[in-house]
Image: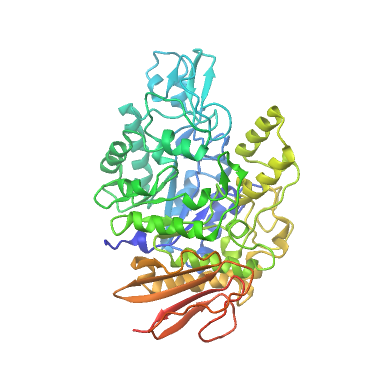
Amino acid sequence: MTHTWWKESVIYQIYPRSFKDTNGDGIGDLRGIIEKLDYLKELGIDIIWLNPIYKSPNDDNGYDISDYYDIMDEFGTMADFDELLAEAHQRGIRILMDLVVNHTSDEHEWFQQSRQSKDNPYRDYYFWKPEPANNWPSFFSGSVWQKDDVTGEYYLHLFTKKQPDLNWENPAVRQDVYKLMRFWLDKGIDGFRMDVIPMISKRLDFPDADTDDFGQIIERYYANGPRVHEFLQEMYREALADYDVMTVGEGAGIPPEMANDYVGEDRKELSMIFHFGHMGLDHGPGGRFDPKGWTLSEFKRIFNIWHQAVGDRGWVNVFLDNHDFPRMVSRFANDNRYRVESAKLLATLLLTMRGTPCIYYGSEIGMTNIHLDKWEDFDDVEIKNAYQAAKERGDDLDKLMAAANANGRDNARTPMQWDDSPHAGFTTGQPWLKVNPNHTEINVIKDQAAPHSIFRYYQEILQLRKAHSTLVYGDYEDLNPDSEYIYYYRRYDANGEFYIILNFSSSEIHNIPLPKDAEITLLISNYPTERGFINNLKPWEAIVYKVKA
């Protein structure tokens, strides 16, 4: 397997709007990120992934871009970005930009031209039809087809109606995309996270969807289109090949058996993808607001399948939460009595798995979901549209609110909790989204001061990963796939062997099977007491053993 810097690195994802505000307008900005670079250096991460910072009317918080060559006003200026890039590089931290090129904003100049007339030179930058071409549902409720009154035709938008999909069949579109990519690469950025990249190639016959299961619709109709690999290989040749950079594809809709079509080392497409199997575990056929239960064995099975799928040929990114999903400690662990222990357990999983880990801002102090009890407190366009659609259908709105609180995207977007002051040290103004009231207990200042805090544990396990190449490149084996309480696996290669045992329950587990015929040392545990070999696991206990050479 090829060894590279991006396999050995750890990513830290920043939602710029929520990280740190320096001018009192209640919205995070680039200067706030510059201010906190030393904090990130102290934590021990290698790469910052920035959610979109380009000019945008913010219908979908920056994923609707009106100018790829400029910075969103609320975030600062291009001079601020250049300073951020230089200051990050000075500290040995790389910068990953979010590339959103499946769609633009309807306020982008290309779309403004495209809608003017049927013979406008930019008409074919987007998909236009005289009538809705099929029954496809949008990610954000309603049809994917929106009528535009200027020409009386309908344009395609997989996301909000202010996010028209680009027509990648048009070579001019592709060349404009590669040009904007080179603009940022020439500035010295270190790569791109590519938003919904499997969806850039459309099925031009636009067949009707024959299922109501939204996950299946994504996989069958939106992702993995007929020319997607041709487009990605062209993108690699024309925009990426001359730079030492990484690319991370958002892999929604990519099944495991197709993974190496995107990330196989011989493919010259993407460095890695985020796989989404575990992110849909608690989603019913109706999507995130149609909740269902999940089991640990299902969770483990997804990691096992993806490990087998990419093998030694490909690579994945490992994540447990991000800006599109709830806080991981609230979703996969215990955010009440065992918040500290279970947040550390998830960190252990994240940083001992094979793949490039991505830490979401605030996870390093165990930030949790927020509970909102008024519809006007929600910001996310997905929730707002779901509410409107549910109201029109006469659905149970209390049930929807419970689902939105459990699985909505606002959970992951609340301001970073720096201290216990009124707005958590995020802003001196009125925050754009409510600060979680638990910031008086959960904050950076408090965690940095405590010797056995979640923050200190992240530091320790980040150092551990960097000290042992086996935790990066080593093989992986699930030693107890059927257990509903214990995740027990080993990482091994010629350089070493490690056993990781995680108790995914709030109960003590007795008689843990220890590795046989091996002399082992305890490397790290998420309980502060010094103990020898552990036969009984405490609630949410995480153990990493190393086999002595």
Horizontally, is 218 left or right of 415 in the view? left
Quarter of the image where one finds residue 495: bottom left
Asked if residue 23 shows in the view, the reply is no
Residue pushed farthest left?
266
Can see residue 490? Answer: yes
| Front position in the image: 447 or 351 | 351
Residue sitting at 43 percent across and 39 percent down?
Answer: 219
> Is 202 on the left-hand or right-hand side of 215?
left
The answer to whether 483 is drawn above or below residue 518 in the figure is: above
- Return the residue found at the far front: 482
Q: How is the image coloured?
A: rainbow
In the depicted structure, whether residue 545 falls above or below residue 532? above
Q: Residue at x 70, y 33 (%)?
A: 395
Image quadrant holding the N terminus, namely: bottom left
Q: Quadrant of residue 73?
A: top right
* Picture coordinates of residue 169, whole percent (x, y): 33, 27
Residue 353's x, y, as percent?
43, 64
What is the count of numbered marks?
Answer: 0
**Residue 235: x, y in percent?**
30, 40
| Residue under the image location 71 percent in, 31 percent down | 391
Front-most of 259 and 81?
259
Quarter in which the C terminus is drawn: bottom left
Q: Nearer the viewer, residue 432 or 330?
A: 330
Query: Position of 373 compared to 548: left or right?
Result: right
Give percent across and percent down for residue 344: 56, 69
